[in-house]
Amino acid sequence: MITLKETDAVVIGVGWTGSILARELTKAGLNVVGLERGNKRTPRENFTIPSVRDDLKYAVRQELFQDAQLETVSLRHSPDETALPMRRLGSFLPGTDLGGAGAHWNGMTWRWLPSDHNARSHIIERYGKNAIPEEMTIQDLPVSYDELEPYYDKFEKLCGVSGKAGNLRGNIIDGGNVFEGPRQNEYPNPPLAKSLAGTIMDQASRSLGYHPFQAPSSNASETYTNFEGMTLGACEYCGHCERFGCEANAKASPNVCILPALLADPKFELRTSAQVKELVYDKASRKVTAVRYIDTRSGEEYEQPAGIVVLGAYVFNNVQLMLTAGIGEPYDYKTGKGAVGKNYCYQVGAGNVTVFLEDKEINPFMASGAHGVLIDDFNGDNFDHAGLGFFGGAWIQAGPSNGRPILTRPVPPGTPRWGHEWKQATAKWYNHAFAIGASGCNYAHRENFLDLDPNYKDALGRPLIRMSYNFHDNDYKLANYISGVLGRLAKAMNPTTMSTPAGIKGDYSVVPYQSTHNTGGTMTGTDPKTSVVNRYLQSWDADNLFVMGASVFPQNASYNPTGLLGALAYWSANAITTQYLKSPGPLLHA
Amino acid sequence: MADETNPIRRRNFLVGAGTAVAASLAQPVASEAQTAPAAAPAPGDQPEPLLTLTATEHAFFAAAADTIIPADELSPSGSDCGVATFIDRQLAGAYGAGERLYRDGPFAKAKPEFGYQLPLNPREFFRAGIAAANDWSRKTYSKDFDRLADTDRVAALKAMEGGTAEFAGVSSRGFFEALLQITMEGFFADPIYGGNRNMASWKMVGYPGLPATYREDIKKYFGKKYDKPPHSIVDFS
């Protein structure tokens, strides 16, 4: 092992949060080393026409994602089962390489509702102190919406988000999301061009008394230059967002929005093919003194001492590194004690409903990744939950994100999956159908958590993260309720035919893609007994360790996580540069 | 009958060297012969040597592709669209060798919610699956799958799809799902991989392919059919 010279700060994982923290810390004068397990990736080299349009390579063979052969997770549905590895990525698709999943996301960029921020106390206040079932271990995010608003705003300006405000300093505006918390500023860019499917959704929603709006989208509707001086191109509506890089530089990514500035700064040093193996934790001094990583080109192991350590890898890697280093107390589902690995959450769909409209030309291939028209009328606590038997809700969206035909070619229910009849239906309906879908809250459950698998190891010989996870009563009821709304919306579109609203049935499956919105395991809170990091994302047990990303979420709201994790990264960076650097030590005392 | 078990002869019989005679022999079903295939691809001008498949395996994939994607007015048959060539190349490459597949043991039988749990890579999986499918086909119909009449092929695939075909050591339903998936990949992927010849499937559904820059067209074609011919990656290379 080679021990390197100490640096002021080391950032583990160079995706959205790692890039933001590295940028803010170098601006504050620190020397920062970025460790990225994957390759260097730049839009100019890697995301160009024609190869960037290769559906098989990117969408199906998973070119940009974490290599499951080297690292994956295992699953068991309940703690009394033996977990099995997810041998091929399916349900979720973590990223790797420079920029991480920020290079191949769809661009949905949300703020949590104010009542998502304080979910637990909000529910108790509105529905009574006994309303929350004992096994639903939800907590408040210890940063209020109002406190985080300027940081949401900053991240939106970094990304050049396209959208329309629904609540501008308290003024409610039709056409925006009227349920959102008050924002101080309009979105940096106007909404994207509306699709026919979006227009149909808009009309159907209004006919039912709902409040449609266009997706807040990090696919720039116009050319845009952000405060880092980085320029985004205008969206081409190419229908190759999710799972692909953007050839137009219109989709916000670390690679476009921040990395060119960071890489040009001599205070930053990027090391790729640098896979962090472990954190060197000195419990007595309450510090992570160094980071050990493998150069995956040579197999050589390095130790990088650092003054500040920023853990900005994906949810599973964050939790794995905390558990293997013994930082904090691992969660025990039997006693409820410990917090590392606790409150792992995901996202609850409600089963898409596909509408078929024989006289409408949908052109599903002309789309961006965050291009739908949505309603938030059934999200969070925007509707009365009295007597419903569940909490939380879902955003509901209609409109295609692509028409790439290996994976997207809807046919009416009852159609065979192959043969002449399948061909006829596929040819007939390809351009005349779209889905209405939902993304639902997933509230924490006592038996859903992450720990280390005793049987399966990754390529570095470390235990895989073991996911104990299943849907529970709240999830089934939520999905069933939302599925009813999907059915009403579909009928209001007067379709020639439609698929049947299905809700969710049975156990969680790792096979079909659902969402890459894995959250929790290092949650933020006010009490070191029930959280892993404080409200500034500083570890309760290692003062110089800051943990980024969706692993700090106490539970998952319905929204795609990037908006919140980007805002929290700026919030944490502000605390480090304005408070911690002046007086290194705990920013809060328990 | 000795010739029928000769794999070289069988492959030549099925895919020929692209001659019209061989092609017509390979399409024995009257309904197919009566319908002029839409946008029929030119017969392969060049021989396409197999990279990994045996002749028997190639014949199986070609027959399955022609049953899953039969020739009609919408497109040529699956094998005429290059699906079997696509599969040969995929299984000969990194995907076939188990790229991005976690293969550490122990291996255990599992419910479908846990996904693929076998130790086999895709190349090995299809080798085992085709052997099992042909064993079952011989037991049920006294012939390998690719030698069955069209109606029997349909019935055989339906039995696999429904899991009622009893394969030795392999799940017939699991095998069918993998077969359907890789066949559809070959039919719909960009032609650079050897399938979807002449973009037959893209023409069938109206998918324009590349360059997919619709900033102006999304307004111009709002609610209107987009009738431009498709382009492949190769057209921009």
Image (spheres, rainbow, N blue to C red):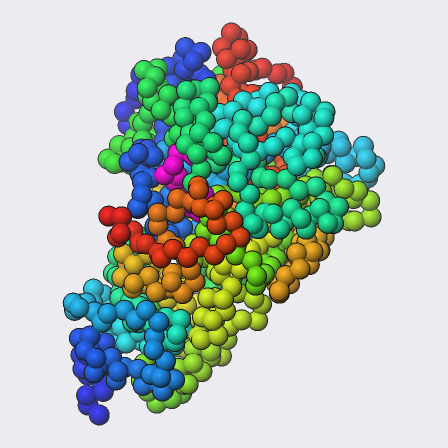
Residue A517 rendering spot, x and y as whole percentages: 54, 42
- Closer to the camera in the image, A260 or A342: A260
Residue B128 lies in quadrant: bottom left
Q: Is residue A245 magenta?
A: yes
Residue A250 in sight here:
yes
In the figure, B217 relative to A41: above or below? below
Report which quarter residue A567 is drawn in: top right
Q: How many marks?
A: 0
Answer with left or right where residue A237 lies relative to residue A472: left
B195 or A379: nearer the eye?
B195
Q: Nearer the viewer, residue A406 or B130?
A: A406
Q: Which residues are magenta?
A: A237-251
- Residue drawn at 41 percent across, 57 percent down: B227
Q: Is B229 included in the stretch rendered in magenta?
A: no
**Residue farthest to the front, as pictured:** B220
Residue shown at 60%/55% (left/top)? A352
Q: Would residue A432 be found to the left or right of residue B49 on screen? A: right
Q: Position of residue A362 (x, y in %)?
A: 52, 54
- Of helix, strand and loop, which mostly describes the magenta segment? loop
Can I make out residue A104 in this image? no
Above or below, A166 relative to B198? above
